[in-house]
Amino acid sequence: MSRPRFLPEPCGDGCDRLMSTAQGKRWTPILQCSADFPPEVFEIAISQLIHHPEYNSTLILRSETVEERTSDMPPSIPALEGFRPIRNIHRRLLPRRPGRDAGLEQHCTLYTSDADEQNCPVVLVLTPILEEGGSLPYYHPAVRHLAFRYVNAEIPLLRIEVDPLPSTPTDLDSRLYRTCLALLDTLHRYGWGALTNYKKRVHHDCIIPREAYQDLYLVMRERHKHLVNEWQEVTDPLKHVFEDIGIATFLMLLWKESFGTQGENGLNDAAVPENLQTAPWKSWPRPPGGFIDLGCGNGLLTHILIAEGYEGHGIDVRARTSWSHYLGATQSHLHTEALDPTAFLEPTAIREHPYLREGVFIIANHADELTPWTPVLATLFSASGYLSIPCCAWTFDEKYERSRVWDYPVPDDSFVDSLNLGGEGGNTSSYSRYRIWLATLSLYCGWAVECETLRIPSTRNWAIVGRKRTAETKEELEISRERAQGIISQVKERGLFKTRIPEGKAKDH
């Protein structure tokens, strides 16, 4: 069942208007459309508007609820003729760029009809909270109040009305009209989604809370955005720099949570609020064996982590132009190496590798041929965990083709559902099947599987996190190790695996 077509129209002079009883003033109706859902759904739809303003404006980072009340309403909210307030949410809007745009607090007030004994909301009024002489930030319409209405009529309507500031244009070419058009479209879409039990295609922030990630990302972006102007590669600096800043941010918070200790109050250290401007991550928990970035490419992710005080190394089959332009501390931690996982069947090779060691955290960001080897290596080296962001689909020694790959056991249907693969849930695409294969491989190697859709500017932003072992005994750990060794033995028997040559091109692939 598809969403009915959104057909907005400007409000004519004959529209009934909201009226503020204190001033006896009629509001200005801007535009309306058919509701296409019953009034009971209106509250669900406006709840999305209240709690996720960032979906409708790229200038807003998120909102935070300051206070919620159902009585003793704030005096600044309007008294409306024929309606009574039943709920007020005081929220704080956080700008995406604090250095450019100011934050703003708002009252979001739900009203019901005076004649409704069931208290079903039919009006939402947004009221900016300004100090005397204060001004509205650019992302906020030039209004004292903005209302979303559900109009019960023969054909139910959604309508937006405003109490505009003096001299604010409201014609069809005005910025206010365009803003209201976008808001009405969003409300119509939310209402239809609620009616049809729409489910999000993917879920973000499954492992790290959105607020913690966004707050740290803003700080990290300011600290490293200069790298865009210093870019040495032919690739797009905007994509690569901000993508790796996002991944570094995620890792720093993941490590803080994963390797933190329990305090006297029973809370993990990660739950304690901190002033990010003082760079508290310099003393945050981190992997006991440092990190290794497999197939580190331009070395940017390794550079950012090292610059922020983390110990680790990046390896790749060839050096990149960027490597020699990083600070010395980074240069000494970037290494040319054609990693051969099949060599680690020998215990001496495991003991002698300088960067893969017990307690290391493995990063495989678009590591291509090394992607499936990530959980295998993590098991063999008793790693503290890994983050794998798959891109090109590879098995251990050839391109992934479902018909030619042996599947690892899938515990049950809920396991696949937990992978947050997106799409319509059929999981029939080759990339979806590959990700399922990687997840079952991780489980087979003894790792509890967690998945996250990262907030980075990439279409390949799905990640597997391994940070907990499924094994509870030494015997179970040994079984996982034997499975990893068995995979290597099978690959060696096939004789197809070839490491890449130093110039970065695979020998026989």
Image (cartoon, helix red, strand yellow):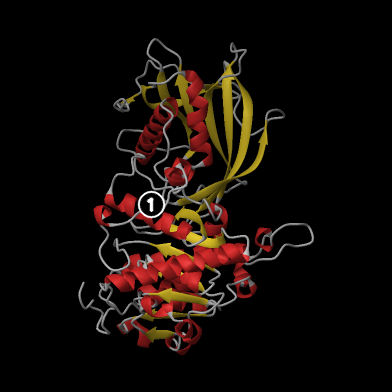
Q: Residue shown at 33%/50% (left/top)?
A: 432
Amino acid at circle 1: Ile
**Visible residue check, residue 299:** yes
Compared across the picture, whether 445 is left or right of 323 comes to right
Q: Residue furthest left?
A: 508
Label 1: which secondary element: helix
Q: How many marks?
A: 1
Task: Name the quarter where the C terminus is drawn.
Answer: bottom left
- Quarter where residue 493 is shown: bottom left
- Along the line of sight, the residue nearer the viewer: 392 or 475: 475
Task: Name the quarter where the N terminus is drawn.
Answer: top left
**Visible residue check, residue 144:** no
- Quarter where residue 198 is shown: top left
Q: Residue shown at 36%/33% (left/top)?
A: 185
- Quarter where residue 427 is shown: top left
Q: Is residue 236 above or below residue 203?
A: below
Rendered location of residue 464, percent (x, y): 45, 58
- Along the line of sight, the residue nearer the viewer: 490 or 372: 490
Q: Residue shown at 24%/83% (left/top)?
A: 503
Q: Is residue 396 above or below residue 425?
A: below
Q: Residue shown at 58%/48% (left/top)?
A: 133
> On the image, numbered disc 1 is attached to which residue?
436
Q: Residue furthest right?
A: 264
Rendered location of residue 80, percent (x, y): 57, 22
Q: Label 1: how many residues lie within 10 Å, few (<14), some (14-19) or many (20+)?
A: many
- Along the line of sight, the residue nearer the viewer: 263 or 187: 263
Rendered location of residue 263, percent (x, y): 75, 62
Rendered location of residue 160, percent (x, y): 43, 28
